Structure formats: C-alpha cells, structure tokens
C-alpha cells in the first residue's frame, strides 16, 4: 500500500483549546477512508488542516502529500498537487453559472465535461448548465453541483466533509455510486462523517474522539464499535478507556 | 499620435464595431443602428417609425430619437458611441421619446479602447409615453489605462403604464471615473427598473446617484446597483426611491464587494409619503466571502482568479 498522505504528530489549538492531539495517520492511495466520530471530535478540523484552510494553518507536526511537505503551502497549491475538499454546506455564488463553476474546477481539461459531470451526479445538464450556484438551488442540489465540480477537477485525494448532510436518500445513493466509481478509478477519498451509512462505504476508518484517534482499522472492524459504543455514548468526546486500542 | 486622423468613416465604423463586437449587424436590414464617433455620425440605418435627428457641432453632438406612436421595433437598436484617439471630449446631448403604445430597446456600446484622457459626457432626456416600453442597455468597453471619465446624466419621465428598463454595465477594462446621475418621475401604473453593474480597480472612482419618484398610483420602481472595488478603487452609491401615491411599490438593492484596499459606501434612501405606499431596501457591503474563495482555491484557482470569478458572477 502506497501512502498518498502522511500525517505525523499533528496537534492544533483553536482559541486556546487543543482540538487535535498528536494525530498520526496514513492515507493509502486508491482506498476509501473514513474519519468517524461524534460532533466536536475534531474530524472537520483535521480535514480543514489538511486542505490548509484559513484559520487551520498554525499546527505542530507534519503533513506530507506524495512525499512532499505541504505544511507551508497555500490552498490552491495543494489543490494543484491533487488535493481537494468538499464542504459540509457548499458555498453559494450569486450569479456564477454552474457551467463556469465546473469549467473553473476543470482547469485546462477539454471536452464536454460539463454535461458528463452533471449526468454523473444525477443533474440534467439541460436544466442545470446555465443555472447559478446560488440560493435558488436546494441544499441537495448544491451538494451535487459541488460533487460535479470535484469530478471535473479529478483530483488524487478528495476530502468530503459530512457528504450526507442535508441531502435526501436518493441523492445519498447517487453520491455513494460516485464514490464507488472513484474507487474503481483508483482515486483516494476521505469521508468525514458521524453517519453509519457513510462509514459503511469506507475500506478503512479512523475513529476520532475528543481530538484523538482512538481506533484505526479496516472499516468492518470499526463499524461495530462505532455502532455499539460511539452512537449510543452518553459522554460524547470523553473517550472510553476500553476504546483506546489502536490497531 | 492622433489616431483619428488616420481613420476615415468606414475604418472608424469597422474599428468601433470590431471593439464592440457588433460587426454582424451591418448587413441586417431588420436591425437599426447608429454609430457616432466623437461628434460625428459615421454610419446609421433606421427603420420605419424610428426617427433620429442629429446636429453635429464642434464641441458636442445632439441626437434626438423618436419612436412614433404604435411603432414596435422588434430587434434592439444598436447605438455605438466612442472615440478611438487617446485624448478628447465626447459630449452628447440626447433626447429620446417613445410615443404612446410604442416599444423599442436600445443597446448602446460605448468604446474608448485607447483612452488616456477622455471625457464622455451624456446629458439625456428620456420620455416614455403611455403604455410604451423602453429598454436601454449601456455597455462600456474601456482600455486598461483608466483614462476615461464617464458622466451619464439623464432625466426620465414615465407616463401612465409606461415601462422603463435601463442597465449600465462595465465589467471589462478599467472604469476610470464613472459618475452616473439619473432621476426619474413615474406616473400611474408605470414600471421603472434601473440596474448598474460596475467592476472598478486600481484608482477607479465610481459614483452612482439614482433617484426615482413614484408619483402615480400603482407605480413601481426598482433600483439595483452592484459594484466591485478592488485595488485602490472607491465607489459610492446613492439610491433614493420615493413614493407619494397609493399602492406605489418599490425596492432598492445595493450590493458592493471589495478586495485589497477598495472602499465602498452605500446610501439607500427610501421615502414614503402615502399611507398605502410601500418601499423596501437592502444593502450588502463586504469583502469577498472567504468560503466562496477557499472553495475555488481548493479547485486549483489562485486567489486572484477566484476573486475575479466571484466578482464576474456577482456582476452578471
């Protein structure tokens, strides 16, 4: 297994509070990984730190992508190296047409990728190509448009933050289909989630609690723990001693 | 070098039409057009019911346009105003009247591609008769020097049930100085919509003053300004909408976005003096949204490319 992304001893504090504590993880190329845990566990913070988003740059430790230290480089440089990020709630752009949004993501790629990507996420190009990425789109439609923009970009590593948030079952199924397609193409996906349904899409999972990884294993092994211990847990983000066994 | 001296009327027309992307309209007998370079008409083509009277002077040009009663002009009338030289003043006194039940839309292309120090002054008087429909789109193409000072000033009168729509657009090139002053009176049942969309950069200065008075019952008005100010550009928008008649309705909308050292201000004024009138206003001023920016950067655009795309969308 080839490490596409390597995180070593990563810690991050926000407003004086330690959010990520000594994180070590390897993201293998061509696999679907899940970062799973309750709200406030630090999952989205980790994804934001990997992408280098504003406010998440001041960490200790290291992040290497394709063997290169990316700690100090900007978001767009990371994107051009092959990393991208899908937001839990995608941005709205007044007046910006979906076709222009997808073109921007596609960069220099040629061909009829706009229709192709819209079709892949289940949006009819005839209805959506010339619509704006604005408030007239529902939350689910915006998620699909964002996913289409990621497909248009065709990156090596996709960080998807809460991909099931605010979308209906049909849209979620479409999203899972796309994730499976990406796996076939040997793309690497990291799903940030607290949903069992999303976790089940992963090959490998990291169980987060209170800013720490409390378990990492093939997803099949993490699922029972998440289902039986984490979901019903009464003390969110206070890790159970028994849970702390890294594999 | 005086570029104008090297150009005859045909070349001027060609150059202006090339810059404004209007070359295809010359061979269209169904499309009216008038091309004015500096203070001279270089080419025109009119249609039945559309009359244009021009008086050329050394220091200005007077253009009176009349759309006769009941005339419906199907295709937009193309008006191309501009100056190829680097320096000079183009002063236009415009009088436009649409008589009752007529309808026409005008597409004005204003091109100053080489401007170092050019003033484009327009004093307009527009009358839209009963049940008439008037649409005016003014699209500016400026060069990269920022040497254009544009002063479009107009007084507008809408008769009963008249419809008026105007749009001022400058998205590409440097704005230079833009000083818009429009004031309109709207009679019963009339509808007025004024839109300005301007992108300013470096040391550009934008002043927009749009005033509309809804003086007739059920008159409706909408004033919308969208301005982006980047670099050291400054923009000030003053929109005033008054309503003094029953069931008059209106809305003022101002969106301004800044980047770098840009400064924007908005003064929406709404005034209601009839108990059955209603006006609302909305202003949003701020920098480019961080999430929008970071999303595009996460797709590989650098900060400037991402900002340009966001502004382009906002000004659409």
Image (cartoon, coloured by chain):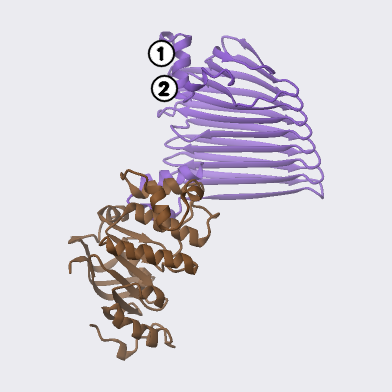
Chain colours: A brown, B purple
Q: Which residue is pictured at 55% across the width and 42% down the height?
A: B226
What is the quadrant of the N terminus of chain B in the image? top left
Specify whether A11 is left or right of B165. Answer: left
Q: Chain of mark 2?
A: B
Q: Which chain letter goes with mark 1?
A: B
Element at label 1: helix
x and y percentages locating residue A169 in the rendered image? 48, 69
Residue plotted at (38% across, 61% down): A86
Per the rendering, the mark at residue B107 is none
Residue on which disc 2 sits: B114
Placement of A86 over or under B78, stated as above or below: below
Residue B204, can we see it?
A: yes
- Looking at the picture, does residue B214 appear above or below residue A40? above
Q: Tell me the crowding category of disc 2: few under 14, some 14 to 19, or many 20 or more residues within 10 angstroms, Cα based.
A: many
Q: Residues within 10 Å of mark 1 (few under 14, many from 20)?
A: few
- Mark 1 and mark 2 in contact? Answer it, CB < 8 Å: yes
């Amino acid at each position: 297994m080839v490490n596409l992304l390597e995180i070593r001893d990563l810690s991050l504090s926000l407003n004086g509070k330690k959010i990520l504590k000594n994180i070590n993880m390897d993201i293998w190329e061509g696999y679907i990984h899940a970062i799973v845990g309750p709200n406030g566990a630090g999952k989205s913070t980790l994804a934001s730190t990997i992408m280098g988003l504003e406010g998440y740059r001041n960490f200790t430790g290291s992040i290497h992508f394709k063997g290169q230290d990316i700690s100090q480089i900007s978001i767009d440089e990371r994107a051009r190296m092959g990393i991208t990020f899908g937001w839990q709630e995608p941005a709205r752009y007044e007046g910006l047409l979906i076709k222009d949004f997808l073109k921007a993501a596609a960069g220099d790629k040629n061909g009829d990728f706009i229709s192709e990507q819209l079709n892949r996420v289940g949006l009819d190009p005839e209805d959506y190509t010339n619509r704006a990425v604005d408030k007239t789109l529902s939350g689910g439609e915006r998620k699909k448009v964002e996913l289409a923009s990621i497909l248009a970009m065709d990156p090596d590593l996709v960080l998807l933050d809460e991909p099931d948030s605010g979308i209906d079952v049909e849209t979620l199924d479409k999203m899972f289909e796309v994730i499976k397609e990406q796996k076939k193409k040997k793309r690497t996906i990291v799903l940030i989630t607290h949903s069992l349904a999303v976790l089940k899409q992963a090959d490998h999972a990291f169980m987060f609690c209170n800013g720490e990884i409390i378990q990492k294993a093939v997803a099949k092994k993490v699922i029972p723990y998440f289902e039986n211990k984490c979901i019903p847990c009464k003390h969110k983000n206070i890790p159970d001693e028994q849970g702390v066994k890294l594999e | 070098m005086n570029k104008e001296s090297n150009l005859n009327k045909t070349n001027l027309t060609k150059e202006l039409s090339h810059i404004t992307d209007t070359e295809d309209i010359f061979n269209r007998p169904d499309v009216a057009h008038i091309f004015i370079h500096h203070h001279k008409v270089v080419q025109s083509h009119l249609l039945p019911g559309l009359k244009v009277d021009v008086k050329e002077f050394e220091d200005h040009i007077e253009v009176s346009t009349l759309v006769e009663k009941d005339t419906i002009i199907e295709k937009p009338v193309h008006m191309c105003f501009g100056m190829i030289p680097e320096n000079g003043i183009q002063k236009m006194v415009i009088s436009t009247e649409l008589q009752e039940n007529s309808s026409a839309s005008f597409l004005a292309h204003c091109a100053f591609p080489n401007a170092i120090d050019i003033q484009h002054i327009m004093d307009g008087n527009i009358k839209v008769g009963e049940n008439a429909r008037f649409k005016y789109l003014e699209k500016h193409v400026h060069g990269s020097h920022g040497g254009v000072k544009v002063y479009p000033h107009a007084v507008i009168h809408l008769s009963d049930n008249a419809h008026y729509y105007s749009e001022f657009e400058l998205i590409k090139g440097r704005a230079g100085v833009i000083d818009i002053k429009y004031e309109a009176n709207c009679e019963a049942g009339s509808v007025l919509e004024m839109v300005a969309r301007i992108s300013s950069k470096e040391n550009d200065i934008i002043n927009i003053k749009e005033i509309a008075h809804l003086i007739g019952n059920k008159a409706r008005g909408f004033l919308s300004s969208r301005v982006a100010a980047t670099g050291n550009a400054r923009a000030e928008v003053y929109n005033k909408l008054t309503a003094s008649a029953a069931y008059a309705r209106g809305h003022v909308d101002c969106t301004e976005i800044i980047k770098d050292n840009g400064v924007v201000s908005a003064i929406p004024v709404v005034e209601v003096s009839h108990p059955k009138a209603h006006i609302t206003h909305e202003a949003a001023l701020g920098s480019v949204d961080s999430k929008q920016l970071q999303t595009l950067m996460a797709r590989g655009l650098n900060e400037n490319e991402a900002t340009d795309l966001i502004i382009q969308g906002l000004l659409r």
